Image (cartoon, rainbow, N blue to C red):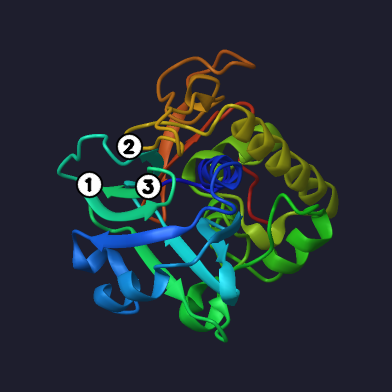
Amino acid sequence: MPELPEVETIARGLDRKLPGLKIVKAKVLRKDSIESPSPAQFCRQIEGHRFGNVYRRGKYLLANLSDNAAFVCHLRMSGRLLFIDQDVPLNKFVRVRIFLENGKELRFEDMRVFGRLWYVPRGRAVEEIVTTIGELGVEPLAGLTGKQLALAFKGKKQPVKSALLDQRLIAGIGNIYADESLFLSRIHPLTQAGALKGDELEILSARIQEVLSRAIKSGGSTLRDYVDSDGVNGNYQDRAMVYGRKGEPCRVCGSEIEVTKIGGRSSHYCSQCQIKKRARRR
C-alpha cells in the first residue's frame, strides 16, 4: 500500500498541475471505485468545478475544488492517480476518468479495486463524508516530537512496530518506513511501545522524519504497483536499510537481516543493531 512518501509525492506533483483547471466531465468505469456520493451523482456534481490546491492527510489525497467543494482519493493497495493526456490508450485497470479543459485528464487506475474516490459537496466538511480522516493521528512531518510519541504510546503494551502502523496514533506510516525508522533508531520492533523512554522517543521521532523526508526525495518506493502522477517509479527501495532485504547483510554491522511477523505484517530488522530488551520483572 502506498504510504506517506508515495502519497506526498503524488500530491506535490498534482499540486503543480491541477490548480485552476476546470473539470469538463467525469466518467466512472467501475462503480465501486466511488465511495460517495453515487457514481451518477459524483459525475454530475464534480463537473464544472475548478481544482484548487492538492495536499495530503495521512495516506489520503485531497484537492480543494471551487465553490468550497472537495475531492478525496485513497489509493489503498494498487491505486494510481495519473495526470495524463486524454488520448492515451486505456488499459483494463482504468476505473474513473476526470476530463479537464486542456485535453488532459485525471485518470484513476486500480488493479485490485480497493481504492476509493469521494466528492465532498459545498457546506460539508471532509471529515463528515470521509469519517476516517477525522480519526487520524498526528502528522509525522509536522514537527513530530518525542513528547507527542510519548503521549500516543502511553500505556501501550503492543509492539512499537504495531503502534507505528496505527493510523489513529500517527498518520501515514506503513510497513516500509516503520521498519526503516526503527532500524535507524536501534529499536527492536517487538519492544513495547509504552516502555520506550524519553531519549528513545526523541531519537525515534527524529528518525521517522528523516526516513520519510529521504523517501519523498527519492519519489517513494515502488515494490509493485506504485507510480507518481506522471507514471514514474520511486526508487527509495534501492536505498532501504532493512526493508525487503531478508538474508542480506546489514549495511551497518554485516549481520544477516531477519524477518518476523508482527500483527500479521512482515517486519525486517537487524538483531545486532536492534537488540531486544528483556521485560522487567515486577
Name the residue furthest bottom.
123
178 versus 148 height, above or below: above
Q: Amino acid at mark 3?
A: Glu
Where does label 2 land, which residue? 225
Task: Tell me which residue sits at (19%, 59%) in the image.
Answer: 29
Where does label 1 land, which residue? 111
Q: Percent from the top left, x then y, of residue 39?
A: 26, 73
Relative placement, left or right, of 206 versus 139 is right
Task: Tell me which residue sits at (50%, 39%) in the image.
Answer: 176
Q: CA distance from mark 1 to mark 3?
A: 19 Å
Task: Tell me which residue sits at (79%, 42%) in the image.
Answer: 203
Q: Are marks 1 and 2 in contact (CB under 8 Å)?
A: yes
Q: CA distance from mark 1 to mark 2?
A: 9 Å
Q: Can you tell which of label 3 and label 2 is closer to the viewer?
A: 3
Q: Nearer the viewer, residue 126 or 217?
A: 126
Residue 257 visible here: yes
Q: Percent from the top left, x then y, of residue 131?
A: 49, 79
Q: Are marks 3 and 2 in contact (CB under 8 Å)?
A: no
Q: Amino acid at mark 1?
A: Met
Q: Percent from the top left, x then y, of residue 8?
A: 58, 45
Residue 105 numbered tag: 3
| Earlier sequence position, callout 1 versus callout 3 | 3
Quarter of the view holding residue 37: bottom left
Residue 282 visible here: no
| Earlier sequence position, callout 3 versus callout 2 | 3
Give the quarter of the figure containing the C terminus.
bottom right
Mark 3 residue element:
strand
84 versus 132 height, above or below: above
Q: Amino acid at mark 2?
A: Asp
Callout 1: few (<14), some (14-19), or many (20+) C-alpha neighbours within 10 Å? some
Q: CA distance from mark 3 to mark 2?
A: 20 Å
Q: Can you tell which of label 1 and label 3 is closer to the viewer?
A: 3
